[in-house]
Amino acid sequence: MVAGDSFVMTESQGTYEQPYPSSPASPEWPPPPPYRPGTPPEPGTKRGRGPVALLAAVAIVAAAVGGGTAYTVQELAGKDATTAVGAPAVPTGKRGDVAAIAAAVGPSVVEINATLAGGSSTGSGVIVSSDGEIVTNNHVVSGASSVKVRTSDGKSYTAEVLGTDSSKDLALIKLRDAKGLKAAALGDSDAVRVGDPVVAIGSPEGLTGTVTSGIVSALNRDVTVSTDENQGQDRGGDSQWPFRFGGREFNGDTGSSTTTYKAIQTDASLNPGNSGGALFDASGRVIGINSAMYSSGSQASSSSDAGSIGLGFAIPVNTVKSDLTALRSGGTS
């Protein structure tokens, strides 16, 4: 701006034009002193919004948007997003603290009991919406005539299967008459690195809310599971659900109908009943759905002979997020 130009200031009461001083020696120089609260303006003058006031207004708006973003991403992670990453469930200062993670995310993991034609199945699930949508493994609820769910506070619900995807060993169920549940924040499994700390929560052997911890042992492991819903119909729990890894079969014959997915390998202890539960990162975000475990008793006929030896596998959460819309529409079963 050059000497003699004018500048315009906009007020809530209107617009006015004031000549810009041609030099510091002009009669209007120096400008009036800054406003002090409680000091009335000079008669016949208008006072505009200075840069500090404008910056303060911008800061307030930014803070409001920032707070809204965290809430929105959290809701999207549960309702419709395929790429959104939920806000951390634990404060930065508690990152990696197993006790803090367990306290924050425990209410988002449930126990699932499915009644089958030839027996029953017990597994776990992860709440992904406050009105009761729950992600679990397809093999936990496949062929179920009824599904019961128990939340961490001991409440029991009846659930219906919304959709299944046997090609990814995923299923989505919905609780009846549920509201106000704590949805888990979904993370980004593409950002996971070998050696990252993890926490697994599920209901092994019906022990609801069991917490174990470990690290990510490997990525992109090829795990093959059966897509035949009649597999393991006589199982009490999910200990006999067959899977194949490294060219060997565990927990029985997978049959001729199978699917293979890239899994996250972890040494966090997983046992029968952990299937469908969550694998959390250090910030309390879900990075995987626990789906298979190798144990020294995998070839045994009794689950009492089975036990975790630190070789567990989880379906990456980005696979889950990309499949949610299809599962809500019935899945591909």
Image (cartoon, rainbow, N blue to C red):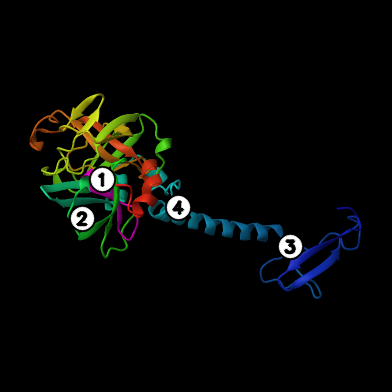
Mark 1–mark 3 Cα distance, whole angstroms, equals 68 Å
Could you tell me the amino acid type at mark 4? Answer: Val
**Residue 134 location (% of width, % of height):** 29, 53
Residue closer to the observer: 268 or 116: 116
Residue at coordinates 53% horizontally, 59% vertically from top-left?
64
- The segment highlighted magenta reads 124-139
Say whether residue 9 is left or right of residue 271.
right
The secondary element bearing badge 4 is classed as helix
Q: 10 Å neighbourhood of mark 1: few (<14), some, or many (≥20)?
A: many
Picture coordinates of residue 59 (x, y %)?
Answer: 59, 56
User: Which residue, given by chain and number where applicable, does mark 2 sit on?
Assistant: 149
Q: Are marks 1 and 3 in contact (CB under 8 Å)?
A: no
Depth check, mark 1 against mark 2: the one in front is 1
SS at circle 3: loop
Q: Earlier in the sequence, mark 1 or mark 2?
A: 1
Question: Which residue position holds label 3?
Answer: 34
Query: Relative to 236, is 331 on the left or the right?
Result: right
Q: Residue at x 31, y 49 (%)?
A: 105
Does the stretch in magenta take in 151? no
Q: As shown in the figure, which amino acid type bears the numbered disc 1?
A: Asn
Residue marked by disc 1 = 138
Q: CA distance from mark 4 to mark 1?
A: 26 Å
Q: Is residue 58 above or below residue 264?
A: below
Mark 3: amino acid: Pro
Which numbered disc, 3 or 2, marks the residue closer to the eye?
A: 2
Q: Residues within 10 Å of mark 3 (few under 14, many from 20)?
A: few
Farthest front residue?
256
